[in-house]
Amino acid sequence: MPDSPLSFPPIAMIDLGPAEAAQPLAARPDAIESEGGHTQVAIIGSGPAGLTAAIYAARADLAPIVLGGAAPGGQLMLTSDVENFPGFPEGIQGPELMARFREQAERFGTRIVDQDVDRVDLATRPFQLWARGTRYTADALIVATGASALWLGLDSETRLRGRGVSACATCDGAFFRGKRVAVIGGGDTALEEATFLTRFSPDVLLIHRRDQFRGSRIMQQRAIDHPGIDIRWNTEVAEVLGDGVVEALRLRDTQSGREWEEPIGGVFVAIGYRPNAEVFRDWLPADAAGYLEVEGETGSVIPGVFIAGDVHDHHYRQAITAAADGCKAAMDAERWLDEQAAAPRVAVPSIAAAG
């Protein structure tokens, strides 16, 4: 990751005062709500899916507003070298790639607001969205909020993220060719990533804090039988070691408490992802893992609401597939708006109300 952080345009903020700012807006009925404006297409999320949707929507003269979140850019902001995105034969830094996405979206007239959406009302059109006390309205909505990798919660892991600590073997595995690497986890994702990494690494350490895996039986057997995978049962990571880059792990036996160090060139945390879909819980159905359910290519149960990227895709989770989703969602939204231009507005009950 670059030494200096990216610089984004300043965002107008609402001054709530020190006492009021500590309270959620919903807890202050006397709070003044400001108007952020109306758009034909609002996009929630500023990763590859959201910004690609913005590029297509802006080029279609839909004047999109992107509510990109307080930490804009998605998972690629945590990625150093990206070598599998087409058009960059020498590779590109993840934050730089997202900055280019953003510049391209803004070039065609996209308005980007770096605030988290904390509430939505999808009962009628125009849809209503609230971000830090400001209300936005939109005729169509694209949900591209992505998913967040689950981490171990270690300070050393955070410090070395992008410098040997990764949450995506498919994205970063090739950078560790010839090095000894570790995969942390016990589900299908960990088992798949450990097997995948044997293409590049002569020694893959698979670390699991229990005495049996949680993944499917076939994936368990593949990992157990693979000569390049060294399984460490009842083991957890106490600390990631390294000065600037990952050099070793301090491991702990979960039964005896004994600790020791293992030299490691890379660490892949594979304990799962959390879809960023909480704000839509009462409106859009999700599967057992919390990923939003898609109808057709990008549609949802609510006409005019479209879904793109990792907030529904827990199979591929790649920047290029998320961008493709964003393209499709914007095109679907444009066609839907054309079809619905003269249609009457119909109330849509929320899941909570229907239940």
Image: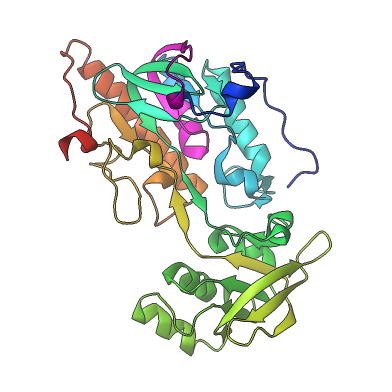
Q: Quadrant of the C terminus?
A: top left
Q: In screen coordinates, is 327 left or right of 46?
A: left
Looking at the image, which is closer to me, 247 or 108? 247
Colour style of the rendered protein structure: rainbow
Residue 104 x %, y %:
58, 25
Residue 345 x %, y %:
18, 15
Residue 278 lies in quadrant = top left
Q: How many marks?
A: 0
Looking at the image, which is closer to me, 30 or 39? 30
User: Which residue occupies 67% across, 48% down?
Assistant: 91
Q: Is-magenta flag for residue 118?
A: no
Residue 249 lies in quadrant = bottom right
Quick check: 53 above or below 127? below
Q: Is-magenta flag for residue 41?
A: yes
Q: In screen coordinates, is 330 left or right of 242?
A: left
Q: In screen coordinates, is 116 left or right of 236?
A: left
Residue 255 x %, y %:
58, 86
Residue 330 visible to an observer of this rendering: no
